């Protein structure tokens, strides 16, 4: 589901439970295409009450491990290094780059 570089970075900064929660959350976002916490909590596959799931997701989303500085900067550094070293990109990376260029990024 996630590229290998994402997986290694995420596993380094998150516990196994947090990593699985993130994967489930990303999967739910892709399937239901909703960003509302109430909707995500209602479909989140945890055998606990709705309010508990909602509080659980709220606590997860404010974790310090999910901050830009700790988690996303290493991913950005990886992307920059990959582009500067000239390593060949795989098919998905080439498609993503074409999409970004077409949208004006």
Image (cartoon, helix red, strand yellow):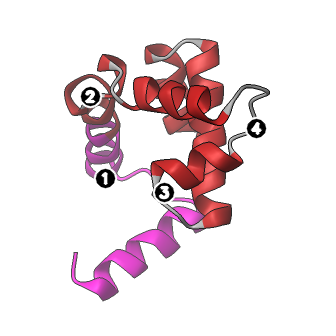
Q: Which mark is residue 83?
A: 1
Q: Which of the two labelled residues, at mark 1 and mark 4, occupies the earlier sequence position?
A: 4
Name the residue tied to disc 4: 45
Q: What segment is highlighted magenta in the picture? A: 76-105
In the rendered structure, which disc, 2 or 3, sits on the residue that comes first in sequence? 2
- Near mark 3 (Cα within 10 A), the count class, few <14, some 14-19 or many ≥20, is few
Label of residue 67 in the image: 2
Q: Nearer the viewer, residue 59 or 42?
A: 42
The residue where tag 3 is placed is 88
Q: Dividing the picture into quarters, in which one does residue 30 lie?
A: bottom right
Q: How far separated are the C-alphas under marks 1 and 2?
A: 24 Å
Q: Residue at x 33, y 27 (%)?
A: 62
Q: Quadrant of the C terminus?
A: bottom left
Instruction: Please give left or right for residue 53 compared with residue 95 in the image.
Output: right
Question: Residue 25, relative to residue 74: is it above or below?
Answer: below
Structural distance between the alpha carbons of marks 3 and 1: 9 Å
Distance (Cα) linking label 4 and label 2: 25 Å
Disc 2 and disc 3 in contact, CB within 8 angstroms: no
Q: Nearer the viewer, mark 3 or mark 4?
A: 4
Does the image show residue 2? no
């Amino acid at each position: 589901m996630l590229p290998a570089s994402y997986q290694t970075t995420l596993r380094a900064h998150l516990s196994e439970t947090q990593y699985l929660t993130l994967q489930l959350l990303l999967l739910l976002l892709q399937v239901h295409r909703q960003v509302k916490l109430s909707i995500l909590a209602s479909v989140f596959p945890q055998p606990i009450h709705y309010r508990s799931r909602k509080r659980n997701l709220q606590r997860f989303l404010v974790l310090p491990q999910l901050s830009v500085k700790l988690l996303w900067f290493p991913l950005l550094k990886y992307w920059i290094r990959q582009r500067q070293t000239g390593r060949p990109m795989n098919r998905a990376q080439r498609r993503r780059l074409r999409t970004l260029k077409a949208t004006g990024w």
